[in-house]
Amino acid sequence: MSRVGTAGERHAALTRGRAPGTLTRRESRVAWVMLLPVLIVVLGAVGYPLLRTLYLSFTDARLMAFTQAPPWVGLSNYAQALQSPAFQAATGRTALFVVASVGLEVLLGVLAALLLNQRFYGRALARALLIVPLALPTVVNAIMWRWIYNPEYGALNALLTQWHLLPEYRSWLGDPGSAMTMLIVADVWKNFPLVAIVALSALQLMDRALYEAADIDGAGAWTRFWRITWPGILPVLSVAIVLRTIEAVKVFDLVFVMTRGGPADSTKTLSLLVFEQGFGFLRSGVGAAYAYLVVAISAVLIALYLTLLRRQAAP
C-alpha cells in the first residue's frame, strides 16, 4: 500500500499544474518511441504508394513500361480528365448513385429504427436480422442480386410476372434505363441497416420526459418526430450520412461485379473509370490523375464531416 501510495503521490506531483491530457517532455519522447514502429509501417505501406501515385499523375506513365522513366507532362493529365466527357459523365453517374443510395438508406434506416424502438413480439429477432445484410461481403451481395435480377430465372422477374405486374421476363441489368436503379437497390439493401443501427442507438438515449411533456401538450406524431426525435438523432446520424457518402463516392466492387460499368457505360462510376484507365488501357499516369481527383472529392466530404463534428462539439 505504501508503494502504491508513493506512486500515486509521485504521479500527482508530476501532473500538478498541468492541463489534463498534456504530457511532459520525457513522456512525449517515450510516446513517440512507442509509436515509431507503427509510423514506419504506415509510411511504408500507405505513404509511399500515395506519393508514387501522385508522381505518376504528372507523367505519361504506362503500366507495362517498367524500365523506362515516364515523361513528365505536368498538369495535362488533370486538365485532360476535367475536360473529358467520359469523366464528366462518370461524375454525374456517381453523384446520382450517391444522392439516391444515401438518401434512401437514411429514409429506410430512420423508419426501421423508429419501428425497432417500439415494443412488440419478436423485436429482438428483428434487430438481429438487421445485421445480416451488413455481415455479407459486398461481392457476395453483388452476386446475390445478380441472381435476383437474372433475365432467365431471376426471382424478381418470377415475382412480378406471377403478380401480373410484368408481362414477360426482362433484363434489368442489360437495360441502360434500369441498370443504375438496380445497383442502387442492391446498395441500399446492404447498407441501410447501418443507418438504422446508428439511429436506433440515438433513439434509446432520448429523454422520455420530452415525449411525456409533448403528450401533455397534445402534440401529434409528426410534431413529436420533427420537434424532438429528429433533432435528437441528427448529431449521430450526420456522422453516418457523411461516412456513407464517402463510401458511395468510392463504390467499385458492387458495380464491377454486377455490370462492369455497362450497358453502354450507363453504370460506369468514377472508381470504375480510374480502374479502366489504369489497368484496362494501361495508362497509369492518366489513371493516377483520375484517382487523385476522386480523392479530392472525398477530401471535400471529409472536410464537411469534420465541420459537422466541430459544430456538434461547440457549446
Image (spheres, helix red, strand yellow):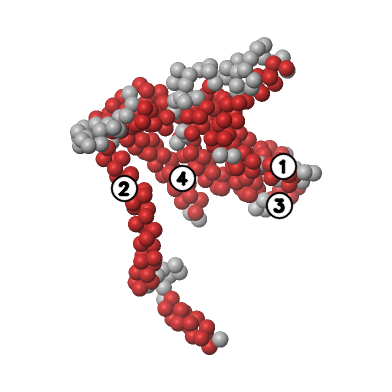
In the image, which disc is placed on residue 208?
3
Measured as percent of width and height from the top left, residue 117 is found at 71, 45
> Of the residues under marks 2 and 3, which one precedes in the sequence?
2
Under mark 1, the amino acid is: Ala
Q: Name which of mark 1 and mark 4 comes first in the sequence.
A: 1
Mark 1 or 2: in front is: 2
Q: Which mark is residue 48?
A: 2
Q: Residue furthest top?
A: 167
Residue 313's disc number: none
- Alpha carbon separation for disc pair 1 and 3: 23 Å
**In percent of the image, x 42 and y 78: which residue is there?**
14
- List the residue tagged with mark 1: 126
**Vertical order, 73 against 29 (above or below):** above
Tell me the element at label 3. Answer: helix
Point out residue 214 in the picture as x, y percentages from the top left corner. 71, 46
Q: Quadrant of residue 281?
A: top left
